[in-house]
Image: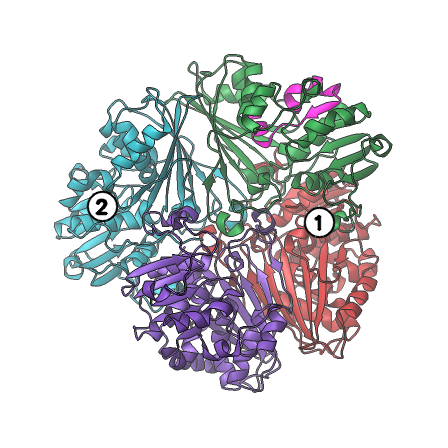
Chain colours: A green, B cyan, C purple, D red
Amino acid sequence: MRVGIVGATGYGGAELLRLLNLHPHIKDIVLYSSSKEGMNIHESYPHLASIYEQELRTLDIGNVKNEVDVIFLATPPGVSAGVSEQLIGAGCQVVDLSGDLRLTDPTVYTKWYKREAASESVLTQAVYGLTEWNREKIRSAKLVANPGCYPTATLLGLAPLVKKQLIDVDSIIIDAKSGTSGAGRSASMMTHYSEMNENFKIYQINQHKHVPEIEQILNGWNNNVTTVTFQPHLVPMVRGIMSTMYMKASKKTSEQELRALYQQVYADEPFVRIRPMGQFPSTKEVYGSNYCDIGITYDERTERITVVSVIDNVVKGAAGQAIQNFNVMNGYEEGTGLAIVPMYP
Amino acid sequence: MRVGIVGATGYGGAELLRLLNLHPHIKDIVLYSSSKEGMNIHESYPHLASIYEQELRTLDIGNVKNEVDVIFLATPPGVSAGVSEQLIGAGCQVVDLSGDLRLTDPTVYTKWYKREAASESVLTQAVYGLTEWNREKIRSAKLVANPGCYPTATLLGLAPLVKKQLIDVDSIIIDAKSGTSGAGRSASMMTHYSEMNENFKIYQINQHKHVPEIEQILNGWNNNVTTVTFQPHLVPMVRGIMSTMYMKASKKTSEQELRALYQQVYADEPFVRIRPMGQFPSTKEVYGSNYCDIGITYDERTERITVVSVIDNVVKGAAGQAIQNFNVMNGYEEGTGLAIVPMYP
Amino acid sequence: MRVGIVGATGYGGAELLRLLNLHPHIKDIVLYSSSKEGMNIHESYPHLASIYEQELRTLDIGNVKNEVDVIFLATPPGVSAGVSEQLIGAGCQVVDLSGDLRLTDPTVYTKWYKREAASESVLTQAVYGLTEWNREKIRSAKLVANPGCYPTATLLGLAPLVKKQLIDVDSIIIDAKSGTSGAGRSASMMTHYSEMNENFKIYQINQHKHVPEIEQILNGWNNNVTTVTFQPHLVPMVRGIMSTMYMKASKKTSEQELRALYQQVYADEPFVRIRPMGQFPSTKEVYGSNYCDIGITYDERTERITVVSVIDNVVKGAAGQAIQNFNVMNGYEEGTGLAIVPMYP
Amino acid sequence: MRVGIVGATGYGGAELLRLLNLHPHIKDIVLYSSSKEGMNIHESYPHLASIYEQELRTLDIGNVKNEVDVIFLATPPGVSAGVSEQLIGAGCQVVDLSGDLRLTDPTVYTKWYKREAASESVLTQAVYGLTEWNREKIRSAKLVANPGCYPTATLLGLAPLVKKQLIDVDSIIIDAKSGTSGAGRSASMMTHYSEMNENFKIYQINQHKHVPEIEQILNGWNNNVTTVTFQPHLVPMVRGIMSTMYMKASKKTSEQELRALYQQVYADEPFVRIRPMGQFPSTKEVYGSNYCDIGITYDERTERITVVSVIDNVVKGAAGQAIQNFNVMNGYEEGTGLAIVPMYP
């Protein structure tokens, strides 16, 4: 397969390059950039020197099918809404890592993203790429909307409870923590080293764009779920997301029972690992890998369930899951190119 | 005043030394240690060289009143239960920074601390040292149980809502995050640098010793509150605690209304700062200082209140509040020696 | 005294505010900013809320003497060259924290700073503010050029050896490491958190502006010293500088002999601490304080001396030393307002 | 090939497991531990769950050849001196990651390691595994002494200059900086998070065990080189080493000339990358990979050369180079299993 990456100079693009290097079915990679055409990728990323020596090109949709078979869009908001349909029309598969095509309701998109939504015809074609729970649709998709980083960790952690209706539907609270790489490569005061190190921040309170994405999927699984409380925090580290999730159990249960459920639900999933009794994951245990590690417990005192779900936001929360979806779309074994052991320490 | 510090080689002890150096009413400081007698304090802490040159002494209760007027116990669990009564008996004031004397019910202590509780007579004399809410009792106390770091941030953040009965009493969820200094100076795998950096951990799930402390105080304020859900996390930073707290509002409210309440409740408090609309504190904004900064919001979609409270765990969560209590006990202006601007960046 | 700070929204300005808060002789502080007039300082720095509530003003030189007695210039390159003379003319004392007035030779300034130098008349009036070694001149100065952060750590570490002619004059190598706060508050790719954490960088190789400053002072002490090799590095931390310095001994010596020399030279200095045998300072041991801690050793195998000097770049390397100079200029005890214990951990 | 790892619960062992997972010629991996037999490896390293499920076994030398063909010794000092000869005798290849077999002169070993050296017969068989410069001998070796982390970065950076005699032989100064993972997994005060974060330390001044290793190899390349000055520092990060190296040029040269030399010398090396003019490597640019990136410059003012060399200490400085040597020993393409793109950011 010939692969194109649009937005190759962002962190999502760089991570695709890291991971695709291990993929046996990639013949050629073309890098597109709207702002840095002509620059060699290793001028932007010296760590890629001698591995990738491509120049960044302008995306020419009229010619794209002559160059690549699949396009990963690692672009800022607003780009994929515009180009996805043309790319599919040109005969390319598209995996969109942006948030543009995840929300099926354009009014919800406009409310949370403060910009115009993609056209209905594009939105209709886009398949939500939470691989573990949407594999069948992804298999035949031409356009995949790759999930957000927070929704990936959160939804994989909540799915068994929500689908089995084991919780009070209006009791879901998600306290999420992320490393700074999720904020991208653009320098800002928020992620200026002197402001961020030895610091822990909360941000976009009640306003994060991933709220409607989480709600949409949960509602699709159990239509009694309409809203969740979700607050994101910024951790002084580069990679990793932890979602700590709190819910009222709808009936008495136990840690054993809940863990057994999770282990059964995810038994055949190569990238979801359920922790044994008394053990909870930390973000570093999935560092650099496509795993989602989940711990679960129940407190008899409060009748509340706590689920802890961790991912590497740049891998399972972005580039890794995009490749996982690419594999499903093309009939490759789902873990192809993703059999990476987490880097520890 | 002549001051004694027991456990001077721990972080709580070192921070007392940092802060007491600015206190105008301290004449003399004596350092006690049960394991390192004879060592000079700056051998353990080179940063104190030329400032403190005391040798560590053995605590001799028979002689203690000849040496000091007030004792700060910065000791591991189990010590103050034993010595507090004798120290008071000897005529010393005592501020205990350990958790031994905070819980009034010995059975609760034994359940959560897995050790025998202090005697009833000691527990009866101990006054809980959350200065802002217990000032009158502290004024005449001989023995103050200085609050835990998590309870300090949490209780200051919850007090107005709980006391005014504005929330569903069984809906309180506290997602707490701390720097590593709270774990003390003993090296461990948990806080080994290579295991902790670029990592975010959850620990002591449903089992942290600060749970009963928080519940006891909340229950004292509003006896309908019996349990809370509290989960602590470890952040790759040294200092700082953030408690993110989630509650269901018991009736419709608004961010304005809630903020106005907080501003009014804490109007005269020198160490509590309420953030303006749309602004939430990060831990670094109180770094090295005795402040507790609080942000609050209300989400109409979910009818849920989120309160964010930050402190420096070593100052307001330990040594700073201890000195604040010491000031109250002795009739000094409460902020004496604590007028420290947070260190930023 | 009434104090003015120009450039109050930078890190140097913020640190002046932290430290001046402890200074007993400061009556009033006026904040000047050329870009943010009208803004309240705590809008830029929430950590200052309730402590400093001043609005930022425009500096009006015609009126400045009515407002303040002394001005701290915490401004980018190029500003103080322009305004210093006017401020002195208006009757203000000036402490300039920028690099504009440190180099006495305008051609050297222009070569390294790539901009026009200040006028000869200003340069002539400026006294180099390395307090420990220039105290007499500072005492009567109206205009002090506060040393750079790297030169402060480096020069205090080298002074005894250079002055006593104990080293080969062309053998001086300075390998310097700094936290990111030295780069200021402007966001940049270099100090973007995701690029800087878990990373160690070298920068401005053979080109750092502090090279000619170090050489000028060393040459003034011993005119056989003409050049040094100085390479700065960026450490993933916010505060702290370590200069590791290597020199060939000009004759056989020993660690004992060298340490004795350092202890004797700095015996009366309140802010220079010499470490005992076998102990070397780390940056955290001076964190937040005005100390410079120095370790020294000699290797018989190589006949080479290694000196290790650490400071907090924002304190002794900027705002702290500025206040130390202000004290000297005004006849206050030199450590007034600076008796701060390093914050540890 | 069947592979055995002795000391699998240390960081070197864990990294071997990460890298060997990508190696196509590994059939089976057996894990040996002298202290944790019976434990499953993922109990010690949860990040390995579902990838490696082996139990740790006791090494039985009588049976080892039935289990494995090659042994990686990732053991503390003193172990490989004892077992290497027996393992070779049993017919196994051995790659020793400890420092036991690197020094050819037992008296030098004893002086620096403060313990008895391995026997002459073992030392004679051990081939120093700096792959780029010892490939021919490694090809036929049965026992490889894998280089230390600091020597790897340092020697690759110095080789062209020393071999071509372009520098004053007694002018070599190596200022080295390492992340904490080099200190291993045992918790200690030195690497306790609260003591290490926001801190920069120097350690083992003039005494580091890697000094004689560097000197031995340099002397082998150019017998006029007898001693170097080498000082190691600890950076608040987990992975990465930078060696900044300073030398007096023996005759006038230029950056262009030096860079051309380096590019020519390392032209065919897959894991050494020379940076273009004006660019110097930072440690993160080789994070998680087997690369050594080198920058070089010359300062006409001082006639001094500065070389900057970075590696990931756990990969090229340990497990990665060990596998590189394993590949050479077995006739595999040298980069087999090591074609890993650095993880960035």
- How many C-alpha atoms fall within 10 Å of the one at disc 2: few (<14), some, or many (≥20)? some
State which region is magenta.
A129-157
| Residue A275 visible, this angle | no
Residue A138 placement (x, y as % from top left): 71, 21
Looking at the image, which residue is at 68% across and 33% down? A320
**Total marks drawn?**
2
Q: Is residue C290 above or below residue B143?
A: below
Quarter assignment of residue C331: bottom left
Q: Chain of mark 1?
A: A
Provide residue A322's location: percent of width, then percent of height: 69, 30
The residue lying at 73 percent from left, 23 percent from top is A143
The residue lying toward the viewer, choosing from D220 and C162, is C162
Q: Is residue C121 left or right of residue A54?
A: left
Farthest right residue in view: A66
Taking depth in this image into account, of D106 and D186 the one nearest to the observer is D186
Could you say which is closer to the camera, residue C167 or residue A105? Answer: A105
Residue for badge 1: A44
- Nearer-the-camera pick, D243 or C193: C193
Which residue is identified by label 2?
B82
The CA span between labels 1 and 2 is 63 Å
| B344 sits left or right of B195 in the view | left
Are the residues under marks 1 and 2 on the same chain? Answer: no
Say few, some or many: other residues with alpha carbon within 10 Å of mark 1 (under 14 / 14 to 19 / 20 or more).
some
D233 lies above or below A209: below
Closer to the eye: label 1 or 2: 1
Q: Position of residue A339 (x, y in %)?
A: 70, 35
Question: Residue B17: x percent and y percent?
Answer: 30, 58
The overriding secondary structure of the stretch rendered in magenta is: helix
Q: Quadrant of the N terminus of chain D?
A: top right
- Secondary-structure class at tag 1: helix
Chain ID for label 2? B
In the displayed structure, C279 sits above or below A113; it is below
